[in-house]
Amino acid sequence: MAAVGERHITKTDLAELEVRLTRLLQHYATKEDLAELKATIYQMEGRLIKWMVGILVGSVFSASSVAILLQRLIG
């Protein structure tokens, strides 16, 4: 029995709730979505490491070149 100000839930209410939940759940990530995201992150991590090593090697080469140039000019 419903109290004052309350009403019984009808089949229409349940159908509307089901539609709203379906729309909401469409935006949630699935296991496949998360697996794809994880693979993308690992690929980007590999690229980032390659760039960091390349920049490190380039920096060492540049610093060595400047040091040798200064030694020849000054020394």
Image (cartoon, rainbow, N blue to C red):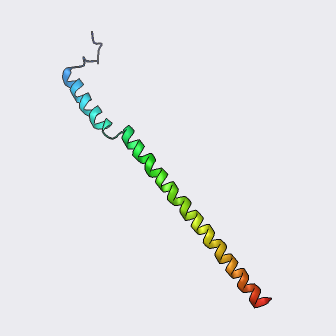
Residue at the location (53% across, 59% down)?
Answer: 48
Does 30 sit left or right of 64 as displayed?
A: left
Residue at the location (47% across, 54% down)?
Answer: 43
Residue 34 quadrant:
top left
Q: Residue 62: x percent and y percent? A: 64, 77
Can residue 51 be seen here? The reply is yes
Q: Residue furthest top?
A: 1
Q: Who is closer to the viewer here, 7 or 63?
A: 63
Q: Residue furthest right?
A: 75
Residue at the location (49% across, 51% down)?
Answer: 42
Can residue 29 be seen here? The reply is no
Residue 2 quadrant:
top left
Give the vertical position of 44 relative to 66 (above or below).
Answer: above
Q: Residue 53: x percent and y percent? A: 59, 64
Residue at the location (30% across, 39% down)?
Answer: 26
Does 22 sit left or right of 37 as displayed?
A: left
Q: Who is closer to the viewer here, 43 or 15?
A: 43
Give the vertical position of 54 relative to 75 (above or below).
Answer: above
Residue 3 quadrant:
top left
Does 69 sit left or right of 49 as displayed?
A: right
Q: Residue furthest left?
A: 12
Q: Who is closer to the viewer here, 14 or 57?
A: 57
Give the vertical position of 52 relative to 68 (above or below).
Answer: above
Q: From the image, which quarter does the C terminus lie in?
A: bottom right
